[in-house]
Amino acid sequence: MATVQTASRSITAEERKVIFASSLGTVFEWYDFYLYGSLAAIIAKQFFAGTDPNTAFIFALLAFAAGFIVRPFGALVFGRLGDMIGRKYTFLVTILIMGTSTFIVGLLPNYATIGIAAPVILIILRILQGLALGGEYGGAATYVAEHAPHDKRGAFTSWIQTTATLGLFLSLMVILGTRTAIGEEAFADWGWRIPFLVSIFLLAISVWIRLSMNESPAFAKMKAEGKTSKAPLSEAFARWNNLKIVILALVGLTAGQAVVWYTGQFYTLFFMTQTLKVEPALANILIAASLVLATPFFVIFGTLSDRIGRKMIIMAGCLIAALTYFPIFSALTHYANPALEAALKNAPVVVTADPAGCQFQFNPTGTKRFTSSCDIVKAKLAAASVNYSNEVAPAGAIATVKIGDKVLTSYDASKLSKEEAAAKEKVFSKELADAIKGAGYPSKADSSQMNKPMVLLLLFILVIYVTMVYGPIAAMLVEMFPTRIRYTSMSLPYHIGNGWFGGLLPTTAFALVAFKGDIYYGLWYPIIIALMTFVVGMLFVRETKDNDIYAAD
């Protein structure tokens, strides 16, 4: 793309309105999206209670995962529309779909009322949410960037990057306010619907603002010149000169950005609550505080990218994160749960098993069952935050685990009935829990022993990495592609990176921990992806800040 230089000027009232409207709408989109995660336990009871446990579990996982899985398809559908008919109307449609789907959830009868139709409709609504979110981000980023002065695209688009965090806060505030106002019992019964229903007011405000806005200048200019694309999908992905940029945008930018983002804002919560056994309320407060402190840095790094370039900031974030994840997460253990750190050092655990019976427990859909004696004991130890070493047993032998001076024998559930497997599981789980406790492994973190300021500092640093990779990336993706196919081209790599590479992080990390027997081993997934992005980005991705985004081709 051509380069252009323009003189700096102050922001206009129209530009402020564009930033506010686009960011506000995207905050609402993320608010709607996060409600599912925040209310997952209550939603499961309301909509999956009438099915058998396995079916309920599968439906619950599908309802959670569907929104991530379909995001790239939403990027294709709405990206095509955005490049053909315009940015304004397309991302107006996305917020209508998102907001309406969320409002309907608040009205949807539960399983006790309409049976199996309830979870089926819920999953359909979740899919619609994911599709809409797949189109919303690309539209908002493109719209803002095409309104921005040349030397302020990073600063303008960085406001959109704050919206995921702000959307999470808004959803938590509405949920907390409702719970406090009506009480836990009423909230679990019917009050959980209120946050979904409230979204209709947020939707109305956003639609009203967006209807009053004009089409982006870059698209309007291209349309007036008759240069709009007739087939954005084939131009974007069937022509090598553009497809290679799409691939580079995925591998050399968004994949690394996604794993750094999910590690800093999602995996840390999982690690704090599930691995370090920190009280969930305290973990949420600490992570929320780190987000509040770090959120301004989205704009700081976005603005800085207008001066020194986008690429080096994103690459630096990926590299620094990859190099420091192990010491930071080790320090989190030291400051958040020192008793666990001591147990990991002083009470070694050994699993002796036939390697042929040990699988890599990657289970993104939740439909696969791991029934070998090796898989059962390793999954339980990983869930209990117990490190272990591996020794080889004779072929066909039942796995054993040595904890201190105790040796426990696992069981093979592959040929057992549900009832028999459940009985075995109950007995073995108690024996294992007692042995782990006896070896000094704490069942939960002692908050009185926690160094909260240091934990907050470490969490803050992890979110700073997020702001480095995420703050400048919207502007860079916009600048990589020509106007006529920009919406389509930038949306797909962004949502594959964030929806798939990022969305699979918790599942992959757990599988790695269970495979190796090391609570930190799951960090290799974001580290390897971030380093891959750093290498590819440094070698093959060009700086974009001086590109002319008005160029149609």
Image (cartoon, helix red, strand yellow):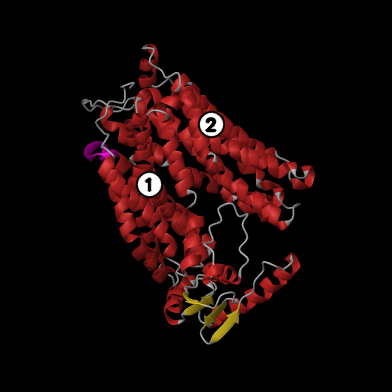
Tell which tag, 2 or 1, sits nearer the viewer.
Answer: 1
Residue 75 percent coordinates (x, y): 48, 33
Picture quarter containing residue 326? Answer: bottom left
Q: Is residue 352 visible?
A: yes
Q: Is residue 20 visible?
A: no
* Residue 450 is covered by the magenta coloring: no
Q: Residue at x 54, y 49 (%)?
A: 172
Q: Which residue is mark 2?
A: 95
Q: Amino acid at mark 1?
A: Gln
Magenta part mainly helix, strand or loop?
Answer: helix
Residue 104 percent coordinates (x, y): 66, 36
Q: Is residue 92 left or right of residue 118?
A: left
Q: Earlier in the sequence, mark 2 or mark 1?
A: 2
* Residue 309 is covered by the magenta coloring: yes
Residue range highlighted in magenta: 303-310
Q: Residue at x 59, y 81 (%)?
A: 408
Q: Secondary structure at mark 2?
A: helix
**Residue 257 numbered tag:** 1
Q: Residue at x 75, y 45 (%)?
A: 116
Q: Is residue 548 above or below residue 434?
A: above
Q: Residue at x 42, y 30 (%)?
A: 237
Q: How many marks?
A: 2
Measured in 3D between alpha carbons, the distance from the residue under mark 2 to the one under mark 1, in whole angstroms, is 25 Å
Q: Residues within 10 Å of mark 2 (few under 14, many from 20)?
A: many
